[in-house]
Amino acid sequence: MIYLKLFLSFLQIGAFSFGGGYAAMPLIQEQVITLNHWLTMDTFTDLVTIAEMTPGPIAVNAATFVGTQVAGPLGALSATAGCILPSCVFVTLLAWVYTRYRNLALLQNTLASLRPAVVAMIAKAGLTILISAFFLNGTFSLALSNVSIRMVCYFIIAVVLLRKAKWNPILVMVLCGVFEVGYYILTIL
Amino acid sequence: MENQKNNVLLKLFTSTLYLSTFTFGGGYVIVTLLKDRFVDHYHWIDEEEMLDLVAIAQSSPGAIAVNGAIVVGYKLAGIPGVLISVLGAVIPPMVILSLVSMCYTAFSTNPFIAAMLSGMRAGVGAVIASVVWDMGRNVVKTKDWVNIAVMLISFCASYFGGVNVVFIILAVALFGMIRSIIAGKSAGTTDAFSSEKRSEKEGSHS
């Protein structure tokens, strides 16, 4: 049953994304692309882009998007419920423990030790996105005819704008999109 | 009394709904704004306690914005507070993404929209690369070789070995827990995390 499947998949995403923000991304990628084939790599990348440009946590955004795409509004509800249930249980329990004992040391140490792994997982998810953007057939191969030089240029410009000029990420992404629309208009003229 | 309680619940709902609708920039921003509202504006939670509640929100699995709403809700109104603030935090992204999702299906075949989205893929890749660079540099900066090794091994296991993300997280969490228990027992030794934790506390004060 699709609703239960969505619920259980996003339950795992909710339960194992430690560190907030992008930490959920590798888990979403694994559940939604690798295991269940609900989205293609391109649609997933669009989803990450959209999540970046709208308010709200990426996991909740992804739950609604994937749920709607796969099974309509009810799908969105089941996925979102799954995604926030672990938070509700875990955080409430922890808040309760905290009001009793006021000690979070073990938990915080464990979290700190998770950080390197979380960085690695995000790096992996980011790399998959870049490979799907850079290579025309979506897989890594150095045949020059397969590399989209344009995308590599956008990437380099975007990195410079983000790192050196400290531009807002949303603005940088929109600029890359506008470049590509400009290119498309040139090709159809 | 009953009125006052309803008032707290209403304020919780409107606050989380408002913050969740208008806050771009993720969980860390939301948590700061929750503090502004409930500590500095309403004076319902004291500063010190709020710092610990934020630490709970950030140390727990799941979205930090949702976790932040849960701790504040729990603190102010118990379980009903949790339900109300989660509802407030989740409704805006659900509504927005449902609309986006419908438009996506209708518009993504339009060549202009498709070109826009395809160009933005390079941009979002750059944003993530930049985030990874910052986070990775912080790990390397600790000069803790165990942490650096954990980072490299997890990357290889995930990227080249195709190991499940959940499994990697569980394994590293177990390893970290054992490590911090051992570090806690050998008193007097400086453990790898204390300096990092201190700087985090200072960071959240400023």
Image (spheres, rainbow, N blue to C red):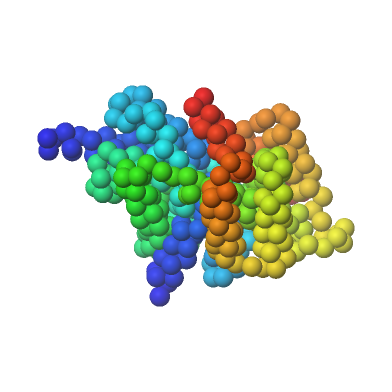
Residue B75, by quadrant, is: top left
| Number of numbered discs | 0
Which residue lies at the image location 68% right of the left edge and 41% below the top edge? B142
Q: Position of residue A135 (x, y in %)?
A: 77, 58
Which residue lies at the image location 66% right of the left edge and 37% below the top edge? A172
Q: Position of residue B108 (x, y in %)?
A: 57, 55
Q: Give whichever of A34, A68 is nearer the camera.
A: A34
Which residue lies at the image location 41% right of the left edge and 65% below the top edge? A7
Q: Position of residue B137 (x, y in %)?
A: 70, 41
The answer to whether residue B12 is seen in the rendering is yes
Q: Give whichever of A162, B6 is nearer the camera.
A: B6
Residue B69, by quadrant, is: top left
Please indicate whether residue B47 sits to the left or right of residue B195 in the image.
Answer: left
Q: Position of residue B201 (x, y in %)?
A: 51, 32
Q: Quadrant of the N terminus of chain B?
A: top left
Q: Give whichever of B21, A22 is nearer the camera.
A: A22
Q: Residue furthest bottom?
A: A1
Q: Residue furthest right?
A: A144
The answer to whether residue A19 is seen in the rendering is no
A97 in relation to A137, above or below = above
Which residue lies at the image location 67% right of the left edge and 68% below the top edge? B162
